[in-house]
Amino acid sequence: MDQIRPTKLEIDESFRVYTKIKESIQRVAKDRKLALAFIELEGSSGRKQTQLRSWRELDIFIGLSPSILPKSIELEKPKKHLVRKLFKKLVKEVAIVAAQKVGAQTENIAYSEHPYVSINLDKYLVDVVFCFDLTPEYIMENGPITAVDRTPHHSRFVDANLTQQQRDDVRIFKAFCHSIFVYGDSSPVGRSGFTGFSTEMFIYHSKNIDSAFDFLSQSPTICLDFFGRSSQELQKDFPKDFLIITDPTDANRNIASSISQRAYRFAQHNAQQLHKQPSSTFFQRQPIPILSTKELAQLTSNYYVIEFYDETTWHYTKTRDKLYRYFTKLQKALRCEPTGELRFGAVTFEEVFQPPIFAIALHVEKSEIKDSYVRIGPPADFIEGVERFTEKHPDAVLVNGRYNAKITRTVTDAEQALRQYFAENLLSPKLSLIDITNHGTTKIGKQSLWILKNAIQPFVNPNIE
């Protein structure tokens, strides 16, 4: 436990950095006659105190009264636009100015739901985020104005409801998630892994770390509710979610909805392995491995690593999501012909990134296919369909009561198909293709191949995912 619990010196240092920025924000806000409801250190390093040792990321939230908005605070699309515009202005005029006054280096303004700024100060990465100061009753009845309006209430909930032992249990669970690459919105396994608040709520419901691992390793589905609803009720309320952990501040929100099923499955597998053979290695954070020379030599030519260099100013999650959407479409194009006939077969891919490098490891069932395939057409008694089909395919022949046509393929090699798809479906001028190889040219590319081979393929159905 001592290896993952932060030292008193680390805690004091993080609060010193927070206080320095907080006092600067207060001075700048006062100069601009901007009333602030609060400035709080949120996240694991704030009042929750569930951070791991050597954690050097801070989340400073600046609370605003909703009265700062024109007219009402009802959620409408124009209001969201106004919130975004307001926060962008405040980030530039308050947060960035305050950061510069204490010698911090500011990164580009980042965008999730709304603008915020990341700054570097004294070896800490600090996100400064504006939110609205809403009562729990308002959020429960109406929902938040922005998603981050819940965050201060999450901190207060953890502070009020988790014992010191449970906070240490959260640290153990976080260390486990980090060690197997299923933590956070940059999780290498799946689009997103376990969030900090989901680990805290998992321990809250499980009571302790042993029960949490028992639950994780044994339960095919998990439904945890702060409001006493049954699993059946929860599955009805959240029909698209396989993992449900409700938000104690908002009964209509599932805080686990962002957790990828892939990340959950891999976590479940590792929890089972931990039970079979306990080892401290399950809690030791390490870089993603790369395949050995021997392992690479044993790989078939069905594996590809596609690497991109990101020169956009997007938040990394936007690039992540854009690539997932792009490769999901590519997956379908490789799997089958437009008319449904099998092409390169089952396709599995996964994305790993460390901006500015984004890498996709991809596996196809067949790396080479025949230069033609049979297109099965309409039955002979479907006159209109036969006319259209034979007009398009004059050489069609009748086989077992249906018209068939032999279609010639222009592309029979999977790598060629990949390159053709990229040429015909441009991503972004500032998201450039580095290369397509069987092994990767960058460290991230090589790591993505390990993730696909060891953390994804053994646990997915390639015909579905």
Image (cartoon, helix red, strand yellow):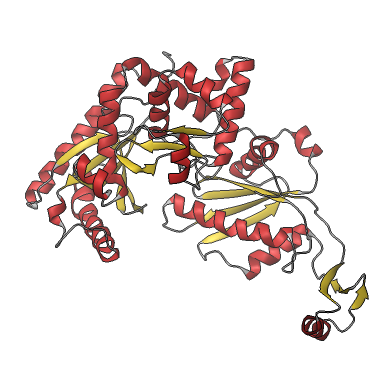
The residue at 43%/45% (across/down) is 237
Q: Which of these two is toward me, 214 or 359?
A: 214
The residue at 80%/60% (across/down) is 413
The quarter of the displayed image where residue 205 is located: top left
Q: Which of these two is toward me, 385 or 286?
A: 385
The residue at 76%/34% (across/down) is 295
Query: Is residue 52 visible to us here?
Result: no
Horizontal relation, residue 234 to residue 288: left or right: left
Where 213 falls versus 295 (above or below)? above
The quarter of the displayed image where residue 381 is located: bottom right
**Coordinates of residue 213 in the picture (x, y in percent):** 52, 21
**Coordinates of residue 78 in the picture (x, y in percent):** 26, 66
Horizontal relation, residue 151 to residue 195: left or right: left
The residue at 52%/35% (across/down) is 182
Horizontal relation, residue 210 to residue 109: left or right: right
**Coordinates of residue 56 in the picture (x, y in percent):** 36, 31
Q: Quadrant of the N terminus?
A: top left
The quarter of the displayed image where residue 256 is located: top left
Where 348 falls versus 336 (above or below)? above
Where 124 falls versus 113 (above or below)? above
* Number of marks in picture: 0
**Coordinates of residue 384 in the picture (x, y in percent):** 77, 84
